[in-house]
Image (cartoon, rainbow, N blue to C red):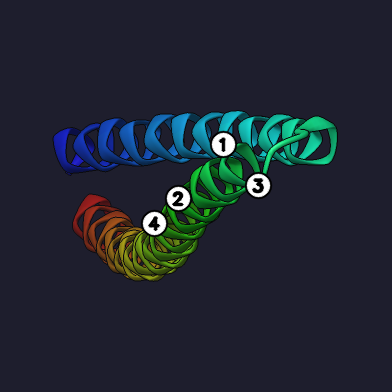
Amino acid sequence: MINSQKLWLLKSEKKRSLRSRSFMLLRWNMQALMQVRRRVTNATTTDAKYQALSHADEATKIAEIHMEKVETMTAELAYLKALLDCKNESVAQNNDNTVLELRSTIKTLKQDLKSKRF
């Protein structure tokens, strides 16, 4: 049980790390896009402008791809967290039931012991 939680935490941490890297890549791509756009405004020839616009389009597509990956990982992480929470609730309920059963058994055994003493 504990190993599965540790495994889930490791997977969760890996997802967070991937998401963090995706956000960094997205930020880097957006900065690259802004830099390309600045170059476009400063470009003097038509060919340079077209080339810069092409780079900007490529950077935009890359940024969109990374954003989709981030959204997917965020949704998957939320699903895994909900699944773990549900499992933890189930385990807690089972533990509560076990405690109640053990208390009842203890009470019965105490009563049996008490009745056998007299």
User: Which residue sits at x=56%, y=43%?
Assistant: 47
Q: Quadrant of the N terminus?
A: top left
Residue placed under numbered mark 3 in the picture? 46
User: Horizontal placement of 90 versus 53: left or right?
Assistant: left
Along the viewing direction, whichever of 64 and 77 lies nearer the viewer: 64
Between 61 and 85, the one lying in front of the other is 61
Residue 25 percent location from the top left of the image = 50, 32
- The residue that mark 1 highlights is 29
Tell me the CA gap for discs 1 and 2: 10 Å
Label 4 vs 2, first from the N-terminus: 2
Q: Secondary structure at mark 3?
A: helix
- Residue named by callout 4: 69
Mark 3 Cα-neighbour bin, 10 Å: few <14, some 14–19, many ≥20:
few
Q: Nearer the viewer, mark 4 or mark 3?
A: 3
Disc 3 versus disc 1: distance between alpha carbons? 24 Å
Question: Closer to the camera: disc 1 or disc 2?
Answer: 2
> Where residue 44 sits in the image (x, y, percent)?
77, 34
Q: Alpha carbon of mark 4 to alpha carbon of mark 1: how far?
A: 14 Å
Instruction: Judge from the rendering whether residue 116 lies leftward or rightward of residue 70; answer left or right.
Output: left
Given contact means CB atoms under 8 Å apart, are the residues at marks 4 and 1 in contact? no
Q: Amino acid at mark 1?
A: Asn
**Amino acid type assigned to the residue bearing label 3 in the image:** Thr
- Kindly report which numbered mark, 4 or 1, lies closer to the viewer in this rendering: 1
Marks 3 and 2, how far apart at CA: 18 Å
Splitting the image into 4 quarters, where does residue 95 fall? bottom left
Q: Position of residue 22 (x, y in %)?
A: 46, 38
Per the image, label 2 sits on a secondary structure element best described as helix
Q: Nearer the viewer, mark 3 or mark 2?
A: 3
Res. 2 image quadrant:
top left
